[in-house]
Image (cartoon, rainbow, N blue to C red):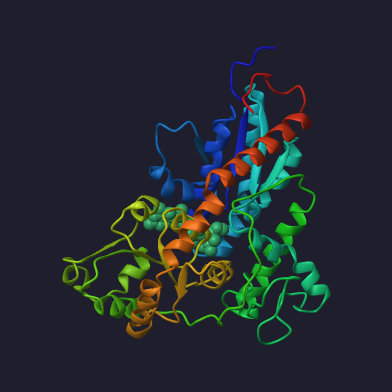
Amino acid sequence: MKWMRKPKIILVPYPAQGHVTPILNLASAFLSHGFEPVMVTPEFIHRRFISNIDSKSDISCISIPDGLEMDKPSDFFAIEKAMENTMPTHLESLVQKLSEEGEVVACMVVDLLASWAIGVGHRCGVPVAGFWPAMLATYQLIAAIPDMVRTQLISDTGTPQHPGPLRFLPDQPLLSTEDLPWLIGTPASRKARFKFWLRALDRSRNLPWLLVNSFPADEFINHDKPQKRCSTRELYESTTYFPRLPFLWVLGPTWKDGLPSGYIERVSKQGTVVSWAPQHEVLQHKAVTCYLTHCGWNSTMEAIRCRKRLLCYPVAGDQFVNCAYITEKWKIGVRISGLGQKEMERGLRRVMDDKKMSDRLERLRERTMGEEASSVMMSSLATFVNDFKKQTDGMFPTDLPI
Ligand SMILES: O=c1ccn([C@@H]2O[C@H](COP(=O)(O)OP(=O)(O)O[C@H]3O[C@H](CO)[C@@H](O)[C@H](O)[C@H]3O)[C@@H](O)[C@H]2O)c(=O)[nH]1
C-alpha cells in the first residue's frame, strides 16, 4: 500500500510556555523521523504562543476549545478545570476526524501535567507515550510520592510530617520539606495540587514510554531553605543599585504594573524592560554575562547551552530542586536570598568573582549537550520510534527514516 501522507504524532503539552517550548523541540525531532507532528493546545495558549512559532515550520499547531469565559485562565485551577472538563471531548473528536479523513495517528505524546489526554489516546486506540518537560530528578521526586506516604514522610494529603530538611529519595541529599513541588499557596491549594499529582501518577502508571526532557542527573545536594518572595519594588531597587551595568529585564504585564511611575524612562539609557524576549537568542549573545533566573528547567538548560552564569531566585514547583543542582552540585550559579540591593550586590559579586565557573559551565555543557550526549539522545529517540512502530505493525510506510 502506498501512503500519500505522513503518519501524524499528536503532542499535548500542559498549556504554559515552559511546556510548549520542549514539546516543540521534540516535535522538530519527529519531523526528521518522517512524521508530521501536530501540537494540540487550548485556545488561550494558542493565541498567546502561536505568533512565536515559525510560520514556515512543518509542525502543525491546532487549538481546541477550553471553555474559559475570560481570555485567559485566572489560575492553575482554572486550567485544570478546562483540561479535565472541556478539552477531552474536543481532542477525541479531532483524533476521530483525522482517522475518518484517512490520516494515521501513529502515537500521542502527552505531557504528564496534561494527563487528561492519556485516556483520550486509549479510547481512540492510539499508543500513548508520557512526556516529562523537566529534570529527571524532579520526576523521580513526584514518582516517589506513594513511598513518601507509606513511610510517613508526608501525609496522604501531601503535608510534610517532619520539620526541617529531609531525604526524600534513597541515596539523594537533603531537601527542605517546603521545596516539595505541590507546596504552593494556601493549605487548600497545596492539597488540591497534591491531588493533581496523584491523578497524573495514577493515569501514567502503565504507559509503555516516558520521554524526559533531561540528561542523566546526579544526586540531590542539600541547600538553604527557600527564601521569601519579593515585590517589584525590591526588584526595582536592586536594578537602581547597579547604574553601571546594562540590563535587559523581562517582566510579565502584572509585574510591570508594579514598577514606580517613570522608572522605565529613567533607566532607558542602560536598561530595557520588556514583557517578552527571544530568550535563547538573547542568552547566545556575547554581551550577556549573567542571567538572573527563576530556575525554570528550560531556562536552566538554555543557560547551560549558552554557557551563562546564573543568579538564582527560585519561586515555585520544581525550581528549588533545579536551583540545588545549579548552585550546589554543578556550581554554575549562586542562589540569592532576596532581590533587594544587598542580596543582589553580594550575589553578583560571588557569581562574577568565581574564576572557575566558566570551566565548570563548559564541562557541564559538553557532558550534557556535547557530541556524545547528543548521539545518546538521538539513539534513545530512534529506539522509541522503532518501538512504537513495532507495536503498531503494518500501520506505517516501510520507508520512514529511523
Ligand atoms: O520572554 C520570554 C520568556 C520565556 N521564554 C522561553 O520560555 C521558556 C520558559 O521555560 P522555563 O524556563 O522552564 O520556565 P516556565 O515557563 O516558568 O516553566 C514551567 O515549566 C518548567 C518545565 O516543567 C518548570 O521547570 C518551571 O518551574 C515551570 O514554571 C524558555 O524556553 C524560555 O526561553 C522566552 O523565550 N522569552
Which quadrant holds residue 273? bottom left
Residue 293 visible in the displayed image: no
Q: Quadrant of the C terminus?
A: top right
Q: Is residue 382 above or below residue 174?
A: above
Percent of width and height locating residue 89: 65, 43
Front-lying residue, 120 or 140? 140
Q: Quadrant of the N terminus?
A: top right
Percent of width and height locating residue 11: 59, 41
Q: Is residue 163 above or below residue 16?
A: below
Q: Residue at x 59, y 57 (%)?
A: 134
Residue 399 visible in the displayed image: yes
Residue sitting at the far right:
150
Front-lying residue, 299 or 377? 377
> In screen coordinates, is 262 left or right of 380?
left
Q: Is residue 274 above or below residue 241?
A: above
Percent of width and height locating residue 136: 64, 58
